[in-house]
Image: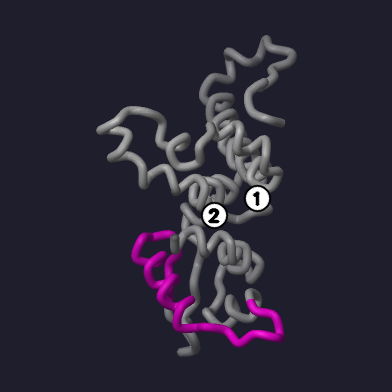
Amino acid sequence: MALKSAVELRIPDIIHSHGGAATLSQIASCINDSLTSPDITTRARIMRLLVHRKIFTIHPPSDGGDPLYYLTHSSRWLVHDSEQTLAPMVLMENHLWEMAPYHYFSQCVKDGGVAFKKAHGCEIWDLASRNPDFNKLFNDGLACTSKFITNAIQSGYKQWFNSIGSLVDVGGGT
């Protein structure tokens, strides 16, 4: 949930926009509008956990000022406007409707069935077709991973793709 919060708050984007390093105060000022006061304590806890998990790094500045947070290899994948971002997948996988089925696993083991259907009374495709916001979130999450995987396959098997003039991914809802 800390990772989801960081992606929702666009913390990787904020650090990236500050040249790759930002203080907690700089991050807070970019998140909050002028009507709210920043909750630095909560942000500090989230950042401390994400530093511990190696999503960000923290270094004291040479001038003795506030510590600077830096992107890591992992958090560079979470910058929204990057050509290859996994931010939509993080948001999709941690959406309340995607998390609810996990609470039905033990029931599925005992009684059988599909956890998503037990949680929502329908399959994911039906839920997405009735909820445009969730449908977009779901499709964006799948599309970002499709780009990532397609690029990895293409770079690993260039010789196989040289003779192909057109290749279409027909899966998904877009």
Q: Position of residue 136 (x, y in %)?
A: 68, 43
Of helix, strand and loop, which one carries label 1? loop
In the picture of the structure, the residue carrying the numbered disc 1 is: 82
Q: Quarter of the image holding residue 17?
A: bottom right
In the image, is residue 38 part of the stretch drawn in magenta? yes
Residue denoted by label 2: 76
Q: CA distance from mark 2 to mark 1?
A: 8 Å
Circles 2 and 1: CB atoms closer than 8 Å: yes
Q: Residues within 10 Å of mark 1 (few under 14, many from 20)?
A: few
Frontmost residue, 136 versus 88: 136
The answer to whether residue 60 is above or below residue 135 is below
Count the labels in the image: 2
| Depth check, front residue: 66 or 116 | 116
Q: Which numbered disc covers residue 52? A: none
Q: Looking at the image, which residue is at 63% across and 81% down?
A: 29
Residue 26 in the image: x percent, y percent?
Answer: 60, 80
Label 2 CA crowd tier, 10 Å (few <14, some 14–19, many 20+): many
Instruction: Classify 2 as above or below 64.
Output: above
| Coordinates of residue 67 in the picture (x, y in percent) | 46, 81
112 displayed left or right of 69? left
Q: Residue furthest left?
A: 110
Magenta-drawn stretch contains 44:
yes
For the N terminus, give its image quadrant. Answer: bottom left
Q: Earlier in the sequence, mark 2 or mark 1?
A: 2
Residue drawn where x is 65% and y is 50% of the image: 82
Q: Amino acid at mark 1?
A: Ser
- Quadrant of the drawing holding the C terminus: top right
> To which quarter of the image does residue 79 belong?
bottom right
Q: Which residues are magenta?
A: 32-59
- Whole-percent x, y for residue 102 in the image: 38, 44
Q: Amino acid at mark 2?
A: Arg
